[in-house]
Image (cartoon, rainbow, N blue to C red):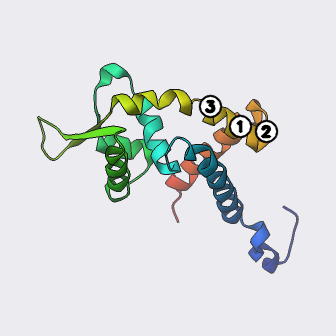
Amino acid sequence: MTSSSPDEYLRLDRQICFSLNAASRAFGGVYRTLLKDLGLTYPQYLVMLVLWEAAPDEGPLPVKRLGERLRLDSGTLSPLLKRLEANGLVRRERSATDERSVTVALTDSGARLREPAATVPRRIASATGLDLQEIEDLRSRLDHLTQALDSAEL
């Protein structure tokens, strides 16, 4: 950055948080359009991605592990899972070995939704105007930023 007055750093267009928020909102609009036909919201789509990614031999995924992967607490995750269950895409069950633990598994309908969802990442990539290497570089830089912020001591 060039040397600027202190007030220059308080300009909205100089704030990385605003740029990230604006990009997130723009992504949300594109995802909302693409996911409408699948009957999913963006947060529900993220849950489904984790469940589709899980190895079939792993069995049901503990809600706690799902929350860790998504960086969501149970208060946010539970309503998402209830809605997915009401739509017949997942099944929640109390663990037989620890009744405090709840697991989540795809239903057959949830597993079948994976195929039509496979077009979403390609369509999102196309909407960005970035090539695949630029997308990977951006994702890597954002992951690095997230790690730095997670470990920041303020």
CB atoms of marks 1 and 2 within 8 Å = yes
Q: Nearer the viewer, mark 1 or mark 2?
A: 1
Q: Earlier in the sequence, mark 2 or mark 3?
A: 3
Q: Residue at x 38, y 32 (%)?
A: 109
Q: Give the number of marks.
A: 3
In terms of secondary structure, where does tag 3 sit?
Answer: loop
Report the residue that reaches farthest toward the front: 37
Q: Which residue is mark 3?
A: 119
Percent coordinates x, y for residue 69 in the rendering: 42, 41
* Front one among 67 and 150: 67
Q: Write down the quadrant of residue 126 in the picture.
A: top right
Q: Is residue 53 visible?
A: no
Residue 36 is situated, as x and y percent measured from the top left of the image, at: 56, 47
Which numbered disc, 1 or 3, marks the residue that appears first in the sequence?
A: 3
Say whether residue 98 is left or right of residue 80: left
Q: Work out whether 76 lies above or below 116.
A: below
Q: Residue 58: horizontal and vertical position, in percent?
A: 31, 24
Q: Which residue is mark 2?
A: 130
Nearer the N terminus, badge 1 or badge 2? 1
How far separated are the C-alphas under marks 1 and 3?
10 Å
Q: Which residue is mark 1?
A: 125
Side of 117 where 18 appears, left or right: right
Mark 1 is surrounded, within 10 Å at the Cα level, by few (under 14), some (14 to 19) or many (20 or more) other residues, namely few
Residue 62 vs residue 47, the one in the foreground: 47
Q: What whole-number distance in Å separates the C-alpha atoms at marks 2 and 3?
A: 17 Å
